[in-house]
Amino acid sequence: MTEYTADEVLKGIKEWAEQCYQQAGQKVEVALHGGRFTPADLKRYATAARACRIALEGLRFEVTGRGELITTGQVVVVVLAGDNGKKDTRALNVLQVAGVLQAALPASRCGLALQDSINAKDVRSANLYNAALDAAGTAGWVITWPVKFQHPRVR
């Protein structure tokens, strides 16, 4: 089994998301985000374009009976889309951005040799209302799913 550090998993998921958007014919700015999303982050990310921010949170480590270090965590993706000056379109725009990943996730390994594929029942999504986003004409959604991978042991 392939060993990954957390940053390698994060980078792999970013590349996978970029490929999903490319295959869907959508231009979406995909970038990594190192941790929790604050209201200030969301205000900074408010955009007239389409954007996707990816983080890996809640890492837990467990050593198996074979001495493998298994890591579990949650991928957190914030997708954002503006109304592009067209009143009442941001809700549809952000759902188009979120829908690409949601449709690609079930039974996927996100382009990585993860311990298991993503189970559709474990994918969560929710509308992310924020007054700063609303005032900027931007809508946001959060999508999360668990990942499990083998981490290299430090000896």
Image: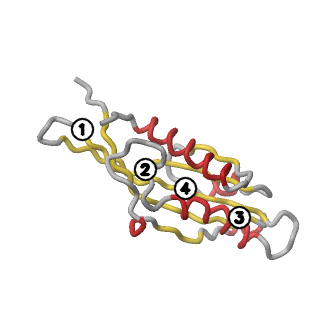
Across the whole image, how many numbered discs are drawn on residues?
4
Above or below, 130 relative to 54: below
Q: Which residue is mark 4?
A: 77
The crowding category of the residue bearing disc 3, from other C-alpha atoms within 10 Å (few below 14, some 14 to 19, many at least 20), is: many
Of all residues, the one furthest to the top in this rendering is 155
The residue lying at 61 percent from left, 46 percent from top is 19
Which element is circle 3 on? Answer: helix
Badge 3 or badge 4: first in the primary sequence: 4
Badge 1 or badge 4: first in the primary sequence: 1
At which x and y percent is residue 123?
45, 65
Quadrant (top left/top right/bottom left/bottom right) for the C terminus: top left
Quadrant (top left/top right/bottom left/bottom right) for the N terminus: top left
Do the numbered discs 1 and 3 sit on residues whose CB atoms are within 8 Å? no
Above or below, 95 relative to 149: below
Q: Which residue is mark 3?
A: 133
Q: Which residue is mark 2?
A: 109
Viewer-side label of 2, 3: 2
Label 1, label 3: how far apart the Cα atoms are: 40 Å
